[in-house]
Amino acid sequence: MKKNTQVFKFGGASVKDIEGIKNVASIVKTYSKGPLVVVVSAMGKTTNRLEAVMAAMKNSKEEALEKLAFLKTECNQVIKDLLGDNSPVFDLINDHFVEAEWALDEPFEKENYDYLYDQVVSIGELVSTQIVAAYFNSIGINTQWVDARSLVRTDENYREGWVEWDETQQSISQIVSPLLAENKVVVTQGFIGSSSDNQTTTLGREGSDYTAAILSFCLDAERMSIWKDVPGVLTADPRAFDNASLLERLSYKEAIEMTYYGAKVIHPKTIKPLQNKSIPLNVRSFINPEGKGTLIFNESEESYPPMIAIEKGQALLQISTKDFSFVAEHHLSFLFQEIKNYKIQVNMMQNTAISFAVCVNDIDDRLANFAESINNEFNITITHGLELVTIRHYESNLVNRLKAGNMVYLESRTGRTLQFVMKRVPLLTRKTEV
Ligand code: ASP
Ligand code: MG
């Protein structure tokens, strides 16, 4: 195990175009004495576009292949502009696109949708890292590209793979540590892994942060850094609030609370592995690499300002028994089993005598399928288009301002956290005549 190892994570926004890749390379170059591992996401909005390929498959395979081909043409253009006409990277990325095409040739059924999704969507990271690693080498950074599927081992829960820690630890020690010892900068993909029978899996959307945390944990890193297009962790999303301010320090606990409830700045699973080994996490800006950013560490709880996380795309499920009996333990156990089967993520819940209310992420047709599966025994109402608001260290003025013009469906307070689920409603204006 090499001492002082650092793990960097660069997200899609940082490598969205040639200028971005060059900027990332200049940051990496200043740290390239190492030991350094660089985890990279798919370029820009590539993952969304690969999801669109999968969505198109539902109607027409031609359309899906067309979308995929269009993406490939764009990638080839990036390679041409960045690495020239004769780069070996053209062939390398061609292989990844062929893998995706093969997946689209397999029977396209509901049962294997998540599996096929992972085979197709994972190429975004494979392609971006091939390009980035080749560019690093071309400017004199001694770089080794590593396939993250040989490092991050998961179960077969496609689209939300659970890490098998022992196998992962072993692979990372065997593969990454020797490369660091040879002073290579290791470039690998975020987000992707593989199951025990070597099928490609993914760790869930925005999972690249988590990959970097897995590597940090297994390499006993000295520090992990997430390079972002914002100055660090802010008290709220600066796109939604005018006066969000930078938090210079944050405890792991605070960071877990906020990210779990939708502060998009870091993937929620990221903190725990780092906390377990007391590895500091620095969230900082690739636009202003001199900025200090936010340092997340084991810090004694100090007083924090109010922090807001808003998670859109929520739905509220209100469930009651058909015979109006109480929602009892055996009902709950059945409901949770089905929630798990349909891969529904629960963000908030409340149990009253005759109904059970849950706020969940509204993804694809999962809720409709879930509703169908419990339809025999339960009545269910689904309200779509909600927002889940979480405020840490809340303060009543702020709460009232956030609720104004909204209808609140569900609310809970625990310790320093206030949460509510709401939907914008048109304000009633009274007619002057009446
Ligand atoms: N490219 C993946 C996504 O957009 C993973 C990541 O960026 O973290 O979800
Ligand atoms: Mg991303």
Image (cartoon, helix red, strand yellow):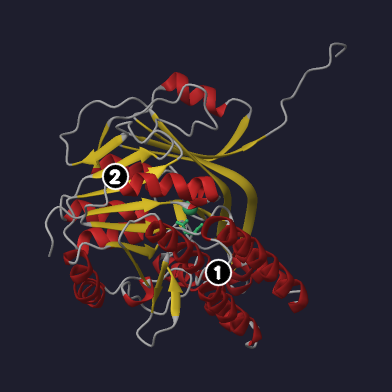
In the rendered structure, the answer to whether residue 341 lies left or right of residue 112 reads left
Quick check: 67 above or below 113?
Answer: above
Q: Nearer the viewer, mark 1 or mark 2?
A: 1
Q: Quadrant of the N terminus?
A: bottom left
**Mark 2 surroundings within 10 Å by alpha-carbon count, few (fewer than 14), some (14 through 19), many (20 or more):** few
Q: Position of residue 381 (x, y in %)?
A: 64, 56
Please say if the residues under marks 1 and 2 sit with CB atoms less than 8 Å apart: no
What residue do we see at 28% from left, 39% from top? Answer: 254
Q: Is residue 410 above or below residue 308?
A: below
**Between 200 and 156, the one nearer to me in the picture:** 200
Residue 176 visible here: yes
Q: Which residue is mark 2?
A: 30
Q: Residue furthest right?
A: 433
Tell me if 245 is positioned left or right of 407 in this view: left
Task: Give the amino acid at mark 1.
Answer: Asn
Residue at mark 1:
86
Q: For the point 52% across and 63% down, which residue is it? A: 325
Q: Secondary structure at mark 1?
A: loop
Q: Would residue 329 appear left or right of 105 to someone viewing this image? A: left
Instruction: Report the residue at 88% width, 11% height from top.
Output: 433
From the viewer's perspective, tell me whether residue 145 is left or right of residue 278.
right
Q: Secondary structure at mark 2?
A: helix
Question: Which is nearer the eye, 156 or 91?
Answer: 91
Which x, y percent locates residue 120? 56, 74
